[in-house]
Image (cartoon, rainbow, N blue to C red):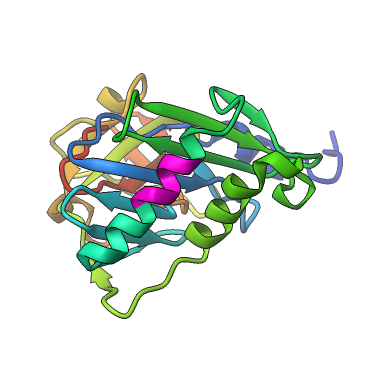
Amino acid sequence: MRRAPGASLLLVALALPGPAPAGEMRDAVAVLEVFTRTLPHHVPDAAPPRFALLEDGRVFVGGTRSMQAGKLSSRERRDLEKRLADVRKLPGVAGRIELGPGERRHRLRLFKGGRPLDLTLTGDPGQARAEMRPLVALLADLERFTHASLRSYEPEAYALSARLGTLRGGCRRWRGPPSVAESVFAPIAVPAAAVAGWPTGATPASVCAGDRSYVVTFRPLLPGEQP
């Protein structure tokens, strides 16, 4: 039986690991994730954070698979923390916020300066209500954040997520521990050395383990982060 156009991509999408939201974040002030599928087979939830600020002023900027790290001056950190505090004061800033029409999705988490906030922001920020302008401006600046101190960053660990399935091109053997099967129900941390040679971030891979095949992702972890 002939498959309908796009059916192969749909089968691949169904086999991909599901969302693996970042877990415990030690020393984090703010983390922004941007969920954009740049290629049909990508898993946006496995990409590194687009931006993260830690208490000591370190910043991390992520793309599809890799990250850069730098450090803000005391004044730069205070200025950014003031903007984060201003966002906290906006009316209706909690939970899920629809900024406008469209399928864009951001996740902004604020850990310091008050009770922790975990915001899911959907739609086109350009169509947001006027009172949300400080939030929209913050999103735009963090999404395209750059700084002279940024350098390539190599994570010490990755979050492994797996789901039964296959991808085109066959599979490779996983030389754990840990076992890939352990990460089917919840992500688990694996050291960077175990991930050498594997695609990371939003790009999935196909793993053979025993008589089963898995589709896996390796999401880079920030310092002190637990999956």
Specify whether 166 is left or right of 198: right
Specify whether 188 is left or right of 101: left
Q: Is residue 102 magenta?
A: no
Q: Which residues are magenta?
A: 81-86
- 113 or 38: which is nearer to us? 113
**Which residue is rendered at x = 51% and y = 31% of the image?**
119
Q: Position of residue 164 (x, y in %)?
A: 45, 28
Location of the N terminus by quadrant is top right
Circle count:
0
Most common secondary structure along the magenta stretch? helix
Residue with the most extreme top position: 185
Tell me which corner region of the image, top left, top right, bottom left or bottom right, holds residue 176: top left
Residue 160 appears in the rendering? yes
**Which residue is rendered at x = 69% and y = 40% of the image?**
131
Location of the C terminus by quadrant is top left
Indicate whether 190 appears above or below 67.
above
- 128 or 86: which is nearer to us? 86
- 190 or 63: which is nearer to us? 63
Q: Position of residue 117 (x, y in %)?
A: 42, 27
Q: Position of residue 101 (x, y in %)?
A: 81, 39
Q: Position of residue 180 (x, y in %)?
A: 27, 32
**Which residue is rendered at x = 76% and y = 40% of the image?**
129
Specify whether 21 is left or right of 40: left
Specify whether 150 is left or right of 26: right
Residue 166 appears in the rendering? no
**Which residue is rendered at x = 22% and y = 59% of the image?**
58
